[in-house]
Image (spheres, rainbow, N blue to C red):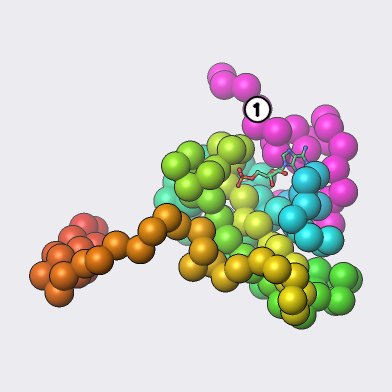
Amino acid sequence: MSEPTIFERIVAGDIPARIVYETDTVAAFLDANPLAPGHTLVVPKTPYERLDEMPADVAADVWAAVQELTPRIEAAVDADATTIGVNNGEAAGQEVPHVHVHVVPRFAGDGGGPIHAVAGSRPDLSEGELDDIADAIGSSE
Ligand code: AMP
């Protein structure tokens, strides 16, 4: 058995967290190093590392929690909007190997950027390359 992830330990009550939502399959708690007031993490209780490892019913439960919580989070901190995202894999910045959806409250003029700012320099792709990529995604089932 591998070591439990830090989020499993939170769900188990072994380490403290400000839990704001809990069902049989999903928990949500405030991020310990928030990017904004109200920054919340929504996690499946089972420690799937990547999004594609989550069974569809658990993924649906996680997304339902995100949808339910987002207006509550915005109201709690009087936010104007939210940025919602997943660092899916180490190269994308994932530090905790347990799926978690970041719900980050946003405020007009907060100095942050849109989700377009997360990747490096933009690629210059030809029409053929775009066609090949679309075909590869569409045919890889
Ligand atoms: P990521 O880089 O997407 O894996 O994000 C991991 C997040 O987990 C970071 O935003 C951390 O601040 C947060 N985090 C790490 N440990 C804890 C903890 N004990 N309680 C709450 N949030 C945590």
On screen, residue 136 versus residue 110, left or right, reads left
Residue farthest to the left?
A: 128
Residue type marked 1 = Pro
Q: What quarter of the picture does the C terminus occupy?
A: bottom left
Q: Nearer the viewer, residue 134 or 121?
A: 121
Query: From the viewer's perspective, is residue 17 above or below residue 71?
Result: above
Secondary structure beneath label 1: loop
Q: Which residues are magenta?
A: 1-24
The residue tagged 1 is 4
Residue drawn at the location 15% of the way across and 65% of the way down: 129
Asked if the beta carbon under badge 1 is closer than 8 A to the nearest atom of ligand 1, the reply is no
Q: Residues within 10 Å of mark 1 (few under 14, many from 20)?
A: few
Q: Name the quadrant where ligand 1 sits.
A: top right
Q: Position of residue 114 (x, y in %)?
A: 57, 70
Q: Nearer the viewer, residue 45 or 77?
A: 77
Residue drawn at the location 65% of the way across and 57% of the way down: 102
Residue drawn at the location 76% of the way across and 40% of the way down: 11
Q: Position of residue 135 (x, y in %)?
A: 16, 67
Residue drawn at the location 84% of the way across and 57% of the way down: 20
- Decide if residue 1 is in sight here: yes
On screen, residue 26 versus residue 117, left or right, reads right
